[in-house]
Image (tube, rainbow, N blue to C red):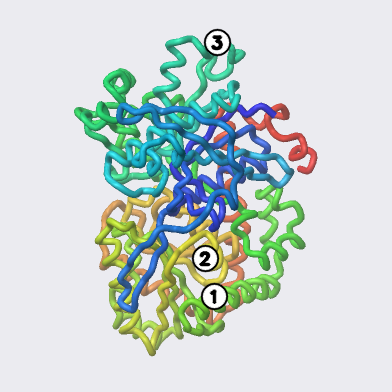
Amino acid sequence: MDHSIAYFSMEVAVDDRLPTYSGGLGVLAGDHLRAAADLGLPVVAVTLLYRGGYFVQHLDDRGTQTEEPVRWDPADLLDPVDCRVVVPVDGRPVQVTAWRHDLAGATGHVVPLYFLDTDLDGNADDDRAITERLYGGDLAYRLRQEAVLGLGGAALLDALGHHRLRVYHMNEGHSALLTLSLADRDAGGSLADRDGTGDGDGRPRCVFTTHTPVPAGHDRFPRELVVATLGDDRARLIEELGGMDGDELNMTLLGMARADFVNAVSHRHGEVSRAMFPGVPVHWITNGVHAGTWVAPAVGRLLDDAVPGWRLDNALLRAAVDIDLEELRAAHAVTKRALFDEVAIRTGVRLDPSVLTVAVARRAAAYKRTDLLLSDPDRLRALVDRAGPLQIVYSGKAHPADRDGKALIERVVAVGRDLAGTIPVVYLEEYSMGLAGMLCAGTDLWINTPVKPLEASGTSGMKAALNGVPSLSVPDGWWVEGHVEGVTGWAIGQDTPDRDDQAEAADLYAKLELVVAPLFYDRPDRYAAVMRSCIALTGSYFNAERMVAQYARLAYRTGLAADVVHPEYSRLR
């Protein structure tokens, strides 16, 4: 099959053996590509290799985080590509090669994923290190990486014979420099042999997805650095394309300027993004998660029996509304034991399977407010006295340069130590795909407390819901759409733009004490019914199959026609 859709992302999460991701952006990219493979879409993907990974997290008894590089050999897991391209960086020719990993879908269709690598003989030492670390180094290092991703990725796909690409999808602004390559081709007329694909004029269609409502999250580089790294001609072209904001290259503006379709990742995020970028028609496609990846084995077996075909058509999960509650509880008990065994191995703490267990597992960043649950320890103690026992499992990394994020972890560990004897609190280091899967399936309640409106979407609660774990969350991101009070979970506070930490903490405690815990301990069938609704209502919609199908129809403009989707998928449906 000719590949006609190219997907670019700074990070992609395939599995824990490939440390090429840091968190939500990479996990979302991996789920996107797995769903594209399931649907049989003609996608090819590009990312960077990161021989040193993101980092391995270590926490001492006080919660102080230290980091070390990941040790892995791509030759053990990936196939080398016999191809090299050259990207001019800092006035030098940097050689770029790639490693390939095939993502096979439910019907056997394959999406090839290329990991770009500059650690090659013939490159200067600094250039060999460009693909060493994810989100490491200074601005100059980041711009060199983004040049390799955008310019090098576009060149590599050409060199590998992907000449019929009709869509380039930029997953965030990191890859926006690929628009320079496309502009060069437009000027040179080299797209004339593309059989009129793209938007009707021979140009490939560009799609840009923005993931952050935080201005600081959009990459910016000073003009003098752009000139030094990319050269005068490239800098002038960036300005012509509309990528300069004053004396800075704004990668988001550059990507949006060339894009035929720009989207946010939830309805609320769309509203925020349109305010951030006046005049830009920002659409919205709410994120989803790959159901086949994130449903735990025990829950998957239950669904296989109760909802045949759900792995090929996630919308069928609506039928989970008829699942036997006792069978759902039994499946959840298996996932809970598996998580508690892992907790015991990692920490020596043996949690009680009969106790209401909540998870707060997010990237340790100040706006995530993962310490809100522990903001009033005395209130927590009183809650337990009145409503029943509680256990709390934390996890999440702070960026090595994020002092506030590291301090957040230390506060959580300190309060947890003070609560010992009343409420067990454990913090699991080295948050990863595997651990996230166990937490999402094995706890009883998923808590998410970001500062509104800074949660663009969030997907961890979707993963939990697929396993029958309800959310107690601030109405932001995807939860604005997914929340049905008392049916798929519960909201913390009001759906207003005002921040009020005290009021939201008070409502969090009130919901735990007066609603969630009484339901869990006194009306277990009613709690199990909420769990079932999570799978039937949340799982059947907030999945990557629906998400990618929307991209196909709205952004890629391919639809899901028989000539685009793998024929085996259509037959099995």
- Indicate the amino acid at tag 1: Glu
The residues tagged by marks 2 and 1 sit, at their Cα atoms, a distance apart of 9 Å
Quarter placement of the C terminus: top right
Which residue is label 2 attached to? 435
- Indicate the amino acid at tag 2: Leu
Side of 67 relative to 166 (left or right): left
Q: Which mark is residue 297?
A: none
Determine whether 213 is above or below 65 in the image.
above
The residues tagged by marks 3 and 1 sit, at their Cα atoms, a distance apart of 57 Å
The residue tagged with tag 1: helix, strand or loop? helix
Q: Position of residue 115 (x, y in %)?
A: 52, 41
- Indicate the amino acid at tag 3: Ala
Determine whether 236 is above or below 21 in the image.
above
Q: In which quarter of the view is residue 267 placed?
A: top left
Label 1: how many residues lie within 10 Å, few (<14), some (14-19) or many (20+)? some
- The answer to whether residue 456 is seen in the rendering is yes
For the residue pair 538 and 166, the one nearer the viewer reads as 166
Mark 2 / mark 3, whichever is N-terminal: 3
Q: Which residue is at the far right?
A: 571
Q: Position of residue 277 (x, y in %)?
A: 31, 33
Which residue is label 1 attached to? 342
Quick check: marks 2 and 3 in contact, CB under 8 Å? Answer: no
Q: Which mark is residue 192?
A: 3
Determine whether 467 is above or below 281 in the image.
below
Quick check: marks 2 and 1 in contact, CB under 8 Å? Answer: yes
The residue tagged with tag 2: helix, strand or loop? helix
Kindly identify the residue that appears in the image at 63 percent across and 43 percent down.
102
The residues tagged by marks 2 and 3 sit, at their Cα atoms, a distance apart of 49 Å
Mark 3 / mark 1, whichever is N-terminal: 3
Label 2: how many residues lie within 10 Å, few (<14), some (14-19) or many (20+)? some
Kindly identify the residue that appears in the image at 52 percent across and 65 percent down.
435
Determine whether 58 is above or below 237 in the image.
below
